[in-house]
Image (spheres, rainbow, N blue to C red):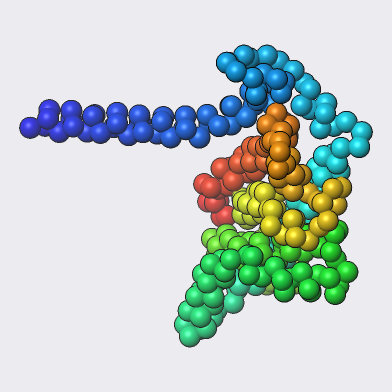
Amino acid sequence: MSETRRSARGAIGTLAELVLIAAVAATLAPILWMLVLAFQPLKDIIGSGVKIDFSLSNFTDLLAPGNPLLAQLVNSLTIVIGTVLLCLVFGSLAGYALSQLILPRWGTIPLLLLAGFIPLIPPMVLVPGLYATMTSLGLIGGNFGLILLNTVFQMPFAALLMKVYFDGVPNTLREAALIDGASEFATFRAVMLPLVKPGLAAVGTFTGIMAWNEFLFALTMTSGGTTSPLTVGIASLVQPYEVAWGQMAAVGTLAAVPIIIISVIANRYIVAGLTAGAVKG
C-alpha cells in the first residue's frame, strides 16, 4: 500500500513539474519570438517561408532623427521616476500613520469595502471628469499631469502595503526611540523606515511597472508624438493599412529592458528582507 502511495505521489509530482514547465514555456515563447522579430528585416517577417536573419534596421529606423521614440522613452522614464518617488514618500508616510492608528471596527469595515470597490471602477468612466479637471489646471499634454494621475491611482496600494510592513516592526523600537527624546518624524526616518526597505522595494517595483505600462491616461491626456509616453508610441505603429511588426517588436524589446532591470534590482532587497528580524538576540 505504501509503495502504491509513493508511486502515486511521484506521478503527481511529475505531472505538476510538466505543467509548470509548459506554463513557463508558454510565457517565454512570445517574449523570445518578439526578440527574434526585433532583429529581423521587414522583408523576412512578411515574406513567405521561414528565414532567420540578423539586422538592426528596426532599431535604426526607430532611433532615426525625427522619430519621436527617443522623446517618448524619456517621457516614460520621467513619469515612472516621478510616480515611484511620490508613492514612496507619501505611501510610506501614510502607511506609518495607518500602522500607528487604531481604527474602530465600525470605521475599518467601510474603509476596506471602499478600498475593494475603487479598483472595480472602469478607468474609462473617470476619463471625462479627469480630463476636465486636468484641463482647468493646465496639466494636459505634460509629464507632470500623468505623474499626478499615476500617483493618485497607485497611492492606495502603496499606503496599504507599507502599513503591512510597518505592522511587522516591533512597536518597542518606536517607543524606545520616543523615550530617548526623538521626535515622531525622526523615529520614522531613522528607526522605522530602514527596517521596511523590502516594502519600499516592493512598492517601488509595483508602482514603477504600473506607471510604465499605463496606456489609457497617456492616450487621452496627451496629444501624441513627442508629448506621449512609450505605450502610446507603440500603439501608433499599428496603422490602418500597415502594421510595422519589426518596429513593434523592437520597441517592445526596449520597453521590456527597464522593467527587467527594476525587477532584478528590487528582487534582491525584497528577498534579503523576508527573513530579517527587527530585533536580534
Residue 162 vs residue 18, the one in the foreground? 18
- Residue at 50%, 35% (x, y): give it: 27
Going by the picture, which residue comes out furthest to the left?
1
In this rendering, does residue 77 appear at all? Answer: no
Say left or right for 143 vs 23: right
Going by the picture, which residue comes out furthest to the front?
241
Coordinates of residue 235 in the picture (x, y in percent): 71, 45
Does 128 sit above or below residue 69?
below
Does 242 sit above or below residue 279?
above
How many numbered marks, from 0 up? 0
Does 257 sit above or below residue 41?
below
Residue 159 vs residue 68, the one in the foreground? 68
Q: Quadrant of the N terminus?
A: top left
Coordinates of residue 84 in the picture (x, y in percent): 73, 54
- Residue at 62%, 29% (x, y): give it: 34
Say left or right for 256 vs 76: left
- Residue at 60%, 62% (x, y): give it: 157
Residue 275 vs residue 16, the one in the foreground? 16
In this rendering, does residue 17 appear at all? Answer: yes
Going by the picture, which residue comes out furthest to the right?
65
Say left or right for 250 vs 142: left
Coordinates of residue 217 in the picture (x, y in percent): 72, 59
- Residue at 56%, 55% (x, y): give it: 279
